[in-house]
Amino acid sequence: MPKVLVNGIQVHYQKRGANGPDVVLIHGITSNLAMWYNGLLNGFVSEFHITAYDLRGHGLTDITPTGYTSENLAADLRALLDVLGLDKVIIVGHSFGGTVGLHFALDNPERVRGLVMMDSGVACLRYLRIIQDWWGWEGRPSDMKEKGLSLDKFLTLDSQQDVTEVIRHGLSVPRRAGFKKGQTGLTPRQQKLLDETRLGYEFRDVAGLTEERLKTVKTPVMALYGETSPYSKMAAHLAKIMPNTCHEVIEATGHFYAIHKPTMAVEKILPFLRDPEGFVRQRKSESEAVEVLAGELREK
Amino acid sequence: MTRERVRHDLVELLKDAREDWDHSVTVTDNTGIFNELGFESIDAVGLSSALEGHFEQALPFPEFMSKAKEQNLKDITVGQLLDFLMQNLESSAERKVA
């Protein structure tokens, strides 16, 4: 399988698609690049040249004890793009994958034409996240309770910097879909990742991605969030403070729409990929027009 | 290439894809790769790369996987993988791995 040496580790990647603009797909924590094989990848391959890869410690990429902050993983991405000869890309990242993309865009603005943040949380804005809205909690109280995790205990664990046990609980409940429906989602690889690394601590690190720094993002960003996502408020705030960002919503779905609603996700994302700057400009001017209209109506 | 020959190569590649392969398992066309052979989706992606390397051509594996998920299949059997290979090894000889 295709692997390259990046920052001292073997990184697994897959390339697919046309001779179009380069698009890089980044999965979230404890996931891997197979998440894109549900129709999302297919939705992009006729127009774009897609590179998907497994983050450090994930999928078929090597595991290391540390190196899981957004800053570390953005450095891995830069080295990967250098090795693969990808000069300028559009990044599509799910959950923490979008955070890595954001960190990369801040560190390397000249390398990024656009960024799609698919329901991504940013550590410095955790105060805007509403964990009670988390679909995984909402739909799983009985699963969690069986494992001795009440909402209060969950919130206590979640408020800490090290959320290894929260992740372990989340993965341990039976899978709700897929080829292994009903079986535990905690695979031996994920077990190893949680047992032997500082992932659960480091991915919550602000790692220099402060609110002040977010205000300097020049890259066109589509913040695409599920309607019932625990990050909805965060998304609206990102669109407010990041100058070139539009907030888009996928109706009637939550944090994992990338997995459960791939067709809807592709429909929303494709226009952005075709012209990131033009797309954001148009959406911002539309929302400004709506605000002006709303203001006029209020005055009347 | 005959179906029997492709089947032989496929089973060898399945074994290579699993570090903890159980050699007591008898693989038939009805064997499910996820629930019986213990594959995860990422192993299947790794297998697709091994197949492309072995047969020296690109295969529409993402389409195959997403179709299986759309159809809510409970598993992908060795027979289904074999059908996929026979169909695509015959029809896409001109395609090369990127």
Image (tube, helix red, strand yellow):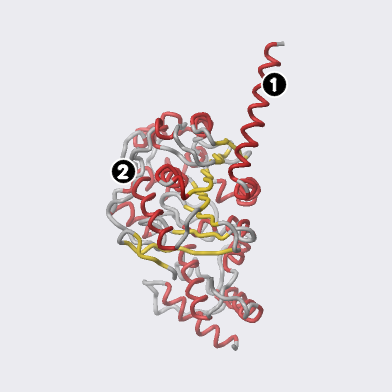
Q: Position of B55 compared to A206: left or right?
A: right
Q: Quadrant of the C terminus of chain A?
A: top right
Query: At 47% from the left edge and 32% from the top edge, which residue is drawn?
Result: A132
Q: Residues within 10 Å of mark 2 (few under 14, many from 20)?
A: some
Amino acid carrying label 2: it is Tyr
**Extreme residue toward the top, this view:** A300
Which of these two is toward me, B53 or A197?
B53
Amino acid carrying label 1: it is Leu
- Between the residue at mark 2 and the residue at mark 1, the CA separation in whole angstroms equals 46 Å
Residues at marks 2 and 1 on the same chain: yes
Which of these two is toward me, A137 or A128?
A128
Query: At 32% from the left edge and 62% from the top edge, which residue is drawn?
Result: A9
Q: Is residue B33 above or below residue A90?
A: below
| Residue A154 picture quarter | top left
- Provide residue A295's location: percent of width, then percent of height: 66, 17
Q: Is residue A298 above or below residue A132?
A: above
Q: Quadrant of the N terminus of chain A?
A: bottom left
Which of these two is toward me, A117 or B34?
A117
- Provide residue B69's location: percent of width, then percent of height: 60, 60
Q: Position of A297 compared to A25: left or right?
A: right
Chain for numbered disc 1 = A
Question: Does the rendering let one see residue A172?
Answer: no
Chain for numbered disc 2 = A
Residue designated by label 1: A293
Precedes in sequence: disc 2 or disc 1? 2
Question: Does the rendering let one see residue A178?
Answer: yes
- Mark 2 or mark 1, whichever is nearer to me: 1
Residue designated by label 2: A201
Give me the disc on residue A76: none
**SS type, badge 1:** helix
- Provide residue A112's location: percent of width, then percent of height: 49, 48
| Residue A5 picture quarter | bottom left
